[in-house]
Image: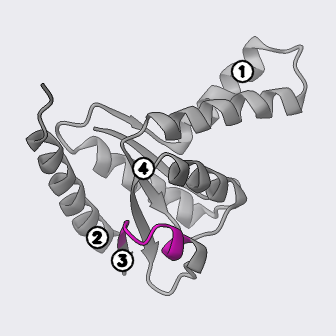
């Protein structure tokens, strides 16, 4: 199972960015995952592009990064999305995920605004409302283990 962790990054405050580290640790500790992509890997790719393509403009680098990001959406089996903060980039990723009918897990801190476009478009998704980091860890870990278990039951011939 390939997981892609997404959420607001450029507009995120320190608290939100710290949560991504919690997500990353939690997801990496789930045994049986094939690959895991997170916001840090997208930014690492951007830095690599900047070093390798010094002749490119900002817009060309942005285009390369966006292509990479959206290829990760397409390759993922499950997207874990923190929607506690809104982001245009996240909205674009979610639009592409919708086109490819990706399994979605939406996590949001209690009291956060959750767009009706998300709940309406992804009405079959799993939504996790959490009150604390510990609550998030417990709920998300449980959901990921269930997904992984169900994925293993499927056999192809």
- The nearer-to-camera label among 4 and 1 is 4
For residue 110, what is the image quadrant? bottom left
Q: Are marks 2 and 1 in contact (CB under 8 Å)?
A: no
- The nearer-to-camera label among 2 and 3 is 3
Q: Are marks 2 and 4 in contact (CB under 8 Å)?
A: no
Report x, y in % for residue 66: 69, 36
Instruction: Please tell me the numbered disc located at residue 134.
Output: 2
Q: Residues within 10 Å of mark 4 (few under 14, many from 20)?
A: some
- Mark 3 or 1 closer to N-term? 1
For residue 39, what is the image quadrant? top right
Instruction: Please tell me the numbered disc located at residue 102.
Output: 4
Residue 118 placement, left or right of 78: right
Q: Is residue 101 at all visible to an observer of this figure?
A: yes
Q: Nearer the viewer, residue 112 or 97?
A: 97
User: Which residues are the magenta region?
Assistant: 118-127
Report x, y in % for residue 88: 71, 59
Q: Residues within 10 Å of mark 1 (few under 14, many from 20)?
A: some
- Mark 3 or 4 closer to N-term? 4
Question: Marks 3/4: CA distance?
Answer: 22 Å
Instruction: Please tell me the numbered disc located at residue 130.
Output: 3
């Amino acid at each position: 199972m390939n997981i892609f962790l997404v959420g607001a990054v450029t507009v995120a405050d320190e608290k939100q960015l710290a949560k991504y580290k919690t997500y990353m640790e939690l997801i990496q500790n789930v045994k049986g995952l094939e690959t895991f992509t997170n916001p840090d890997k997208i930014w690492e790719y951007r830095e690599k592009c900047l070093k390798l393509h010094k002749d490119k403009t900002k817009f060309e680098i942005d285009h390369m990064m966006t292509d990479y990001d959206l290829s990760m959406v397409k390759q993922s089996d499950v997207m874990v999305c923190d929607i506690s903060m809104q982001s245009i980039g996240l909205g674009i990723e979610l639009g592409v995920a919708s086109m490819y009918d990706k399994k979605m897990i939406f996590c949001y801190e209690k009291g956060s605004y959750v767009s009706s476009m998300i709940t309406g478009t992804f009405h079959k998704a799993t939504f996790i409302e959490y009150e604390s980091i510990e609550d998030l860890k417990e709920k998300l870990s449980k959901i990921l283990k269930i997904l992984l278990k169900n994925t293993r039951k499927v056999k192809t011939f």
